[in-house]
Amino acid sequence: MTISKKPDCECAILLHGLGRTAVSMGKIEKKLGESGFRVWNRTYPSRNFTIEKLAELHITEGLRKCQDWGAARIHFITHSLGGILVREYLQTHKIQKLDKIIMLAPPNQGSEVADKLKGNFFFKLIMGPAGQQLGMGKTDKPKTFKPIPGAIGILAGIKSYDPWFSWIFNGPNDGKVSIDAAKLEEMGDFLLVNHGHTFMMNGDDVIEQILYFLRNSKFKK
């Protein structure tokens, strides 16, 4: 079925995390759709390609759909690796009508877990090329980016359901990424939520904060 253009519509591009699928962002997709947004949520092969290739292929497709819908404003809502894809894309592209970027549990300074395990055979096998790029060194992908445009809001978790990784962290974390590693210098707002990394996107309070930021360019304190 063809969806017609709607004047002044807002388009939200959802980007799931490493090893996940579009299903993981389904609850956000449903709520945004009910709130009047046109939503693009598709699975991408996160474990098969580098961050550069994933960003170029997948984000380009999402932006094309927003254009087809006649979007007046374009937003990104990302989980984990998804936020890194947006940052990668914006290093070499300018997105017309870009508005809000909301990142859930992003490894913006790299992931402590990826940094420790990236040389491990099984980690390489399971997480693929992108997983090898998420370390915290100066030459790892997250540390090489220039600041990006857009109104940026970041939600970071403080609960861990991954006790097997607890030895890696020295401070508060969500099981995969520490609070400090989630931050960006150019972020407009930052909020801690009582969730773990893997299922943060399903929290009702998280979705409420996403909607609030989309309307107010800040989180509800």
Image (cartoon, rainbow, N blue to C red):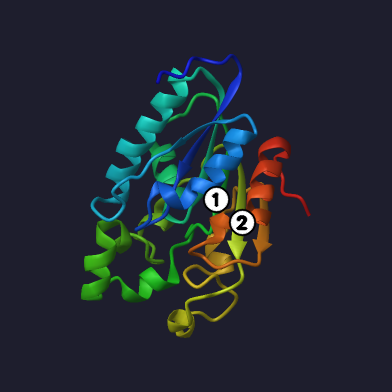
Label 1, residues with CA under 10 Å away: few <14, some 14-19, many ≥20: many
Instruction: Estimate the x, y position of residue 91 in percent, counting from the top left.
Output: 41, 40
Give above or below for 65 relative to 216.
above
On screen, residue 197 versus residue 206, left or right, reads: left
Give above or below for 177 relative to 78.
below
Q: Is residue 84 visible?
A: no
Give above or below for 161 relative to 27.
below
Instruction: Estimate the x, y position of residue 216 in percent, counting from the top left.
Output: 73, 38
What secondary structure is found at the residue carrying circle 1?
A: strand
Give above or below for 6 relative to 192.
above
Residue depicted at x 64% and y 46%: 210
What secondary structure is found at the residue carrying circle 2?
A: strand
Q: Which amino acid does label 2 sit on?
A: Leu
Q: In which quarter of the image is residue 151?
A: top right
Give the labeled residue for mark 1.
103
For the residues labelled 2 and 1, the Cα–Cα distance comes to 6 Å
- Specify the label residue 155 is tagged with: 2
Residue depicted at x 51% and y 65%: 197
User: Residue at the bottom extreme?
Assistant: 167
Quick one: 197 or 36, which is closer to the camera? 36
On screen, residue 41 versus residue 6, left or right, reads: left
